[in-house]
Image (tube, grey):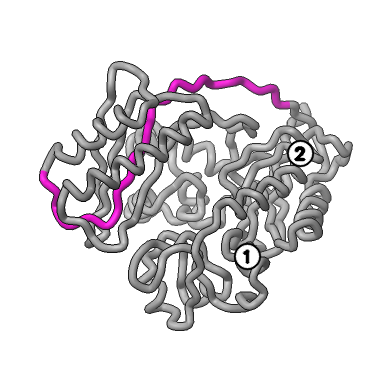
């Protein structure tokens, strides 16, 4: 009996925000740059490969990044420009397939099992896409190609930057067996540490554990880990991913210690969320307030209402209530509000599966 496989490509732009900034400003080319934050405040959104050599990473504080790389150049984020380039890149994807699932502005899954070019080789399609991205935008991309999203995403990291890796159907299990579990997409730092404590370091170690064992130690996620260690993933490429939350946050120039000053910031954030809500024509029931303190510890407080809301006034009032729910532990460097439990609906998609050569 023949096994049916899908052809999945994961495209990941190389240091996207930083690369766009270097493209637009040739003086930055070849230099260590950080997009977002500064040497005193804020958080790095992206780092060029030149900066990464010094250990600078996204989500790192600007102050820490500056200590690691004294010559680091900080550049303000320009999301309108990033969205513009991202739109160009997605247009290229749709020349090949409409089964495109964007994960962010700079990465996406493509199901090319059946494609508009009639090309049976997912590997060649990935090469063509990467070449077109470079010709039209001047930017480089990396790709992973395999039988499912899980393996394709891991593979796209292997030959970065400006490279690609194909994991053929008969290579999938061997590919996964040698991986450190921390490289498994979906296994975070805390779970990886727990696995290490249980003597699970690689895909082989994970595969050696029974389903009962994994469910005992990892609950509902146990079955997923059992399947992933065998290269099994049923997640489909969904062109219209269901939005699960919508939110916004602000990092302050100086730490705030008074709730009164924070109220005005929360009002501004609520206004931004309302704009996004109206754009997507959605509403939600659960409001979550995110608080990041000056020592970088983080806290969230949530409240679920009995009805859907989309009005900035109601969002602000609920966030304000959460702010005063308990005394703040320290001065605050960041506040964020997110709206969850949205009134969106899951859609079903047809996925065609054929046997093919990679």
Alpha carbon of mark 2 to alpha carbon of mark 1: how far?
23 Å
Q: Is residue 96 above or below residue 47?
A: above
Residue 61 seen in this snapshot: yes
Magenta-drawn stretch contains 344: yes
* Classed neighbour count for the residue bearing mark 1: other residues with Cα under 10 Å, few (<14), some (14–19), many (≥20): many
Residue drawn where x is 71% and y is 33% of the image: 99
Residue under circle 2?
Answer: 94
- Residues shaded magenta: 327-351
The answer to whether one can see residue 198 in this image is: no
- Looking at the image, the residue that sits furthest to the top is 306
Q: Residue furthest right?
A: 118
Q: Picture quarter containing residue 356? A: top right
The residue labelled by disc 1 is 19
Task: Say the numbered circle drawn on residue 294.
Answer: none
- The location of residue 114, given as percent across then percent down, is 80, 33
Q: Residues within 10 Å of mark 2 (few under 14, many from 20)?
A: some
Toward the bottom, the furthest residue is: 70
Residue 21: where, in percent of width, then height? 60, 65
In front here: 114 or 297? 297
């Amino acid at each position: 009996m023949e096994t049916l496989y899908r052809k999945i490509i994961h495209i990941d732009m190389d240091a996207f925000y930083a690369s766009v900034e270097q493209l637009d400003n040739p003086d930055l080319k070849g230099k260590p740059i950080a997009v977002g934050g500064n040497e005193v405040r804020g958080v790095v959104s992206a780092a060029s490969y030149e900066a990464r050599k010094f250990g600078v990473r996204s989500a790192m504080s600007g102050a820490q990044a500056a200590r690691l790389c004294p010559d680091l150049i900080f550049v303000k984020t320009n999301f309108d420009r990033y969205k513009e380039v991202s739109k160009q890149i997605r247009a290229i994807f749709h020349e090949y397939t409409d089964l495109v699932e964007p994960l962010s502005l700079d990465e996406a899954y493509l199901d090319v099992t059946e494609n508009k070019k009639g090309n049976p080789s997912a590997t060649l399609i990935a090469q063509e896409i990467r070449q077109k991205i470079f010709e039209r935008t001047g930017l480089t991309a990396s790709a992973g190609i395999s039988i499912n999203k899980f393996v394709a995403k891991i593979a796209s990291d292997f030959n970065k930057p400006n490279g690609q890796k194909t994991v053929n159907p008969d290579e999938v299990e061997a590919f996964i067996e040698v991986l450190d579990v921390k490289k498994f997409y979906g296994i975070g730092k805390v779970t990886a540490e727990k696995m290490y404590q249980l003597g699970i370091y690689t895909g082989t170690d994970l595969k050696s554990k029974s389903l009962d064992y994994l469910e005992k130690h990892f609950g509902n996620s146990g079955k997923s880990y059992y399947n992933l260690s065998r290269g099994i993933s049923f997640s489909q490429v969904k062109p219209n991913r269901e939005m699960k939350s919508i939110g916004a946050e602000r990092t302050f120039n100086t730490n705030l210690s008074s709730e009164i000053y924070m109220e005005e910031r929360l009002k501004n954030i609520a206004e931004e969320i309302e704009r996004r809500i109206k754009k997507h024509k959605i509403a939600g029931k659960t409001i979550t307030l995110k608080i990041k303190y000056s020592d970088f510890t983080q806290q969230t407080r949530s409240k679920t209402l009995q009805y859907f809301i989309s009005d900035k006034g109601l969002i602000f009032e609920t966030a304000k209530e959460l702010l005063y729910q308990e005394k703040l532990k320290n001065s605050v460097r960041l506040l964020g509000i997110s709206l969850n439990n949205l009134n969106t609906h899951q859609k079903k998609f047809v996925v065609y599966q054929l046997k093919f050569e990679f």
